[in-house]
Image (spheres, helix red, strand yellow):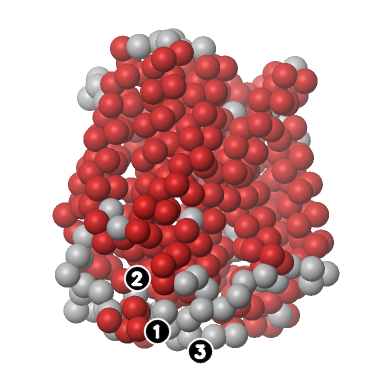
Amino acid sequence: MKTKISLTNVLALCLGTMLEWAEYTCYAYLSPFFIEYFFPQEDLQAAQIFYWMIFASGMLMRPIGSLLFAKLASIIGRTLALFYSLLLMAISTVLIGVLPTFQQIGLAAPLLLMFFRLLQGLSIAGEYNGAAIYLYETAPITHKARRTSLIPLCASVGMLFGSGLCQISQFIFSSQIGWRMPFIFSGSLFLILATIRNNNYLVSLTDVKSTHHLENNILTSLRRYINNKKLLLWSIFAAATIGLNSYICHSFLPLFMVSKNWDYDIAIKTATIGQCICALLIPLLSYFVDKFKYQHISYAFSVALITPLIIFNQVQFANSTLSSLFIAFLFGFTQAYLAITVMTEMNSLFLSKDRYNCIPFLWSLGIVLIAAHGPSLATYLKVYFANDIVPGMIVSSIALLSLVLYPKEFRYIENSINE
């Protein structure tokens, strides 16, 4: 399936992804401020665990949000449903930025923070995988990875944007106000995006799906693969590996570095440089994945098996600029390599008529059931086992499962014929 894709469609597929990942980055990077201002300080470990549980709670609401807004779209239309989902995201993000603290309203502060994170999770349309599928299917067969890589590239750019917002706000405003400004600003951008899409300047991804003859029943799609449970399990664990590498080796990492006596600014810069490296490597690696596409998936998971252990070992025993750059490179390379190879391979393993059902559903299962709980689990287990390498071991263990489960013998011939 090869079609020309317009700049308008690319913008439609990318802007929501960029803003979603920017907001997620703000919440992760500003973790020391949330823990200080929204939780009791008597037990910092408990505060950190509850903070990351609130982080996970937003992701748990995403499947429910997808069902809710899909139903709403059938009643009032896709354009209005998308407008209301973005409006809800804008309002909940801004309200996080103006929340009173624990010192002001007590336990109501973390409860309100969790409530608005739930609203954010509910409102996110989940366009990440659908956008990647659309770009994959509109690409020539020799450019599948390069075209699909636009989506992880946009996610990286969004994370850099979020990181920039955090650092600029901390530089301009006091610490009491600086943590609030990224949420107020990014919430305002969501409101602008909602207005633009409501005026039909950008096409909704759900409209793209409706123009193709696709299977509408997710259970029917999944039944086609019931005899290949290995493929379904691999898809879940592959998505979980990407999520865990991002949430633990990037989002959780700055707070972990601070706990090991690294300066907060250096910790944030390490994570930011890692995202820069990821964004720079995505176009280069996507070229090699296109050129040698059936040799990369095992290499990518092998890299993800080793690098998290090196990263957390390096944080433990070194505190220098060279160590910071080394950690940033390891994360950036691993995340770029994983995102490109997994997205391209997952698309090649499913029939075109089933992709819009199977891939987002299985991807969400991997994130919701496994990856979302990575940071809170890492916080608890590293203390329980008194071992600071445990966070890296969590990522490595899921990467190992993905490597073992990879269904290399399974690929529908129809995919290569139709595309």
Query: In this figure, what is the number of numbered marks?
Result: 3
Q: Is residue 237 above or below residue 185?
A: below
Q: Is residue 296 above or below residue 113?
A: below
Quadrant of res 199: bottom right
Instruction: Check residue 348 in the rendering and tell me which mark sits there, or answer none.
Output: 2
Instruction: Check residue 418 in the rendering and tell me which mark sits there, or answer none.
Output: 1
Q: Secondary structure at mark 3?
A: loop
Label 3 crowd (10 A; few <14 / some 14-19 / many >=20): few
Q: Report x, y in % for residue 402.
A: 24, 53
Q: Pointers 3 and 2 in contact (CB under 8 A)?
A: no
Query: Residue at coordinates 35% horizontally, 83% vertically from top-left?
Result: 417
Q: Give the alpha-carbon distance from disc 3 to disc 1, as whole Å.
A: 13 Å
Of the 4 image quadrants, the one containing the C terminus is bottom left
Instruction: Check residue 213 in the rendering and tell me which mark sits there, or answer none.
Output: 3
Q: Report x, y in % for residue 2.
A: 51, 79
* Of the two numbered discs 3 and 1 in the rendering, the one whose residue sits closer to the viewer: 1
**Of the image marks 3 and 1, the number of the one nearer the N terminus:** 3
Q: Nearer the viewer, residue 233 or 279?
A: 279
**Of the image marks 3 and 2, the number of the one nearer the N terminus:** 3
Q: Is residue 33 left or right of residue 381?
A: right
Q: Please state which amino acid type lies under the numbered disc 3.
A: His
Q: Please state which amino acid type lies under the numbered disc 1.
A: Asn
**Of the image marks 1 and 2, the number of the one nearer the N terminus:** 2
Q: Report x, y in % for residue 412.
A: 27, 79
Q: Is residue 308 above or below residue 366?
A: above
* Of the two numbered discs 1 and 2 in the rendering, the one whose residue sits closer to the viewer: 1
Q: Is residue 405 above or below residue 385?
A: below
Q: Report x, y in % for residue 247.
A: 43, 40
